Image: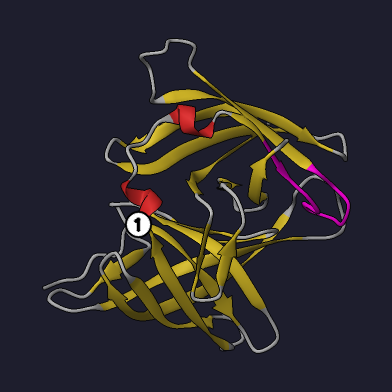
Amino acid sequence: PTQEIPGVWLGYFIGEDTSNFAVGIITEDHEARFVGSNIQYAGPERALGVTANSSVFYGNLGEYSWTESASDYNATVRSLEIGGWVATRALFWGTYRYNDTQETGAIYFYYNTTYEVSPNVRNLAGDWVAGDVFEEGNTLTLTVIPDPDIENTTSGTISGGDGLGNSFNGDIVIHYRAENVYDVTLSFNGDELTGLATYVLEMTTEGIDISKKTLALGVSNADLTRMISVLSTLGD
């Protein structure tokens, strides 16, 4: 049967000189956000696909990385192709290739069962802190406040700022009622950034070590010139 790739995944993009850990968020519509610290691999709906009656997956993503010339989260994007094999709710692995240089690398990701948790914005409530964001020594804090109506578990607000004087505000809502994936909209310097978020719980597997509950949030703007990508934990 055709294998399924939607889920929350933990793993690596491994190049010749780099190894980037990321939390992968893939929706039922095959939109994808692989969220790392200061790097992000993203694609819109149907960015990924699986060949019918097989375990072969394929797709196209943009690799977002920050430029170092300013403090407003400006990003550059490189396009890449990925492909390989997937085992439903277990793992996927394969290779990637940059379209501009033809450089290649490897990918491997393991399924995380938080995808199966009933989504509830109250599970994201609190102050999420990430260090060394955009530049060394810069701390970014994002505060998620669920809707005050105790019966509404599907939406809330998100706001925050960093040590460089930047501030953010927006909304967070559940993307799918049955999966622990959230749509995020952030307003920053007059620009609207949209993307996905999820969280993973403490775990250790196959060389991947998550020491405490971690929020993965990746957003970008429409013209692909700005992005925010953070792995953050709840502040004490």
The residue beneath circle 1 is 7
Using the rendered view, name the quadrant where residue 235 is placed.
Answer: top right
The answer to whether residue 61 is above or below residue 234 is below
- For the C terminus, give its image quadrant: top right
* Colour scheme: secondary structure
Q: Local crowd at mark 1 within 10 Å, few (<14), some, or many (≥20)?
A: many
Figure quadrant of residue 169: top right
Quarter of the figure that contains the N terminus: bottom left
The relative height of residue 215 versus residue 150 in the rendered view (above or below) is below
For residue 156: magenta?
no
Q: Relative to the observer, which residue lies in front, 222 or 182?
A: 182
Report x, y in % for residue 4: 24, 65
Viewer-closest of 150 and 147: 150
Q: Residue 107 vs residue 218: left or right?
A: left
One can see residue 60 in this view: yes
Q: Residue at x 51, y 75 (%)?
A: 80
* 222 displayed left or right of 176: right
Of residues 235 and 220, the one drawn nearer to the viewer in this rendering: 235
As displayed, is residue 170 above or below residue 149?
below
Q: Residue at x 75, y 49 (%)?
A: 73
In this rendered view, identify the residue nearer to me: 138 or 77: 138
Q: Residue at x 60, y 50 (%)?
A: 212
Is residue 168 shown to the viewer in this render?
no
Residue 79: give x, y in percent of width and height.
Answer: 54, 71
Is residue 136 a member of the stretch shown in magenta? yes
| Residue type pointed to by label 1 | Gly
Range of residues picked out in magenta = 128-139
Predominant SS of the magenta segment: loop
Q: Is residue 198 left or right of residue 3?
A: right
Disc count in the image? 1
SS label for mark 1: strand
